[in-house]
Amino acid sequence: MSTADVDYVLKRMGSLDYYGERNLVQLVATTGGDGISLLRGFDDASEVQEFLTFTVDKSGYDVPSDLEDDVRNSLATSYGYNHISAEYTGRVTDDIRVLDGDERIEGVPEVLYGDPNGITNLPATPTLAYNRIKGSTYELRFARNKLRPKLDSGDTLRLDYTPDLDFSRLSDAQLEDIAKKVYGSKNDVEEVRDDLGLDSSNNKDPEFDGFKIDSDGGDVYYEAKNVKTLREEELKKKATFMFALDKLSSDVDDVRMVLYSGNEEATQQIATKIDKDWFTVRTYTVQLRPSSDRNSALSAAVVEPKEISNELKEPVTI
């Protein structure tokens, strides 16, 4: 990072308020050349401005007061790893602004900070960092482009929704009904009990990537998976949680599950494995980085496993 780099970025940004200047200093102090390179990579000054000045309403959420700084640092680090492009980073930044500004949508800070799947606190290993940023930003992209357009004025969309549920309140008849819906027979009730952790002290509150409370009834649980392989047992466990919530919460009614997958082959495979009237799977792919970026100077310093290169060749659907 040279003085010329800093001067170039400052000239491109135009005027920044105190908040923007403070964030620029923080970004460069924390990420060094990665932050400067990202700012240079944006197409115009408006993208730089938005990246440096976006804010999130954190009231009511147990997240750090400097959450926005952490998000900027992680995105700059991911750019430095050559995992995401400046264009993709700009889209994610705009997703944060749009989703957080929509009064029908809750939980944006949870998506950003969620442990262990949020954008912030990236693992030190480049491969693990790539998997984290690929999954967490995918949640924002699909929420903005696929879920938000489906919301009516009276609807509520809860992102990274983690309800506090007491599964012990479920009756034997309710457990059998869940077993029949998810596993095909009420005799599979032990599978349901195991999913819910009823017979162990290891039970954990479920987390739903997106949960739409429809003002007209017929609620929807949305799951986002930007991976090559979708595991049937994992998705059925999530469905068990979904039906348990349906029975325990007065806010939820006639719920169904819609999975968005970032891989077309995985979509087709899971559609044949889970053939249920409560389950729908759709493909929504994103391109984290154009293939031409592989020839950039940054790529020489990146430790990338082979599967990353393959995954980034998937088509983009916006």
Image: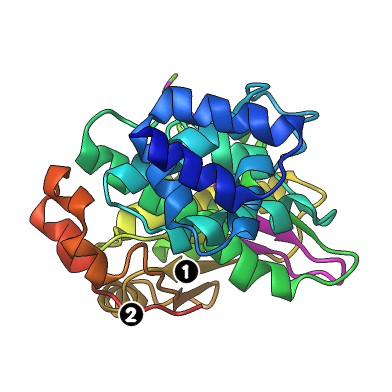
Q: Quadrant of residue 64?
A: top right
Q: Position of residue 288 (x, y in %)?
A: 37, 62
Which residue is found at the position 31% from the left and 70% from the top?
290
Q: Is residue 124 in view from this perspective? A: yes
Per the rendered image, the range of residues in magenta is 202-221
Mark 1 secondary-structure assignment:
strand
Q: Which residue is mark 2?
A: 315
Closer-to-camera residue (90/56): 90
- Judge the density around disc 1: few (<14), some (14-19), many (≥20) Cα neighbours within 10 Å: many
Closer-to-camera residue (200/27): 27
Q: Is residue 187 in view from this perspective? A: no
Task: Kindly report the secondary structure that dominates the magenta region of the rendered protein.
Answer: loop
Q: Which mark is residue 310?
A: none
- In the rendered structure, which amino acid carries the disc numbered 2? Pro
Q: Is residue 199 left or right of residue 25?
A: left
Q: How is the image coloured?
A: rainbow
166 relative to 84, above or below: above
2 vs 1, front mark = 2
Closer-to-camera residue (215/277): 215
- In the rendered structure, which amino acid carries the disc numbered 1? Tyr
Q: Position of residue 122 (x, y in %)?
A: 37, 32
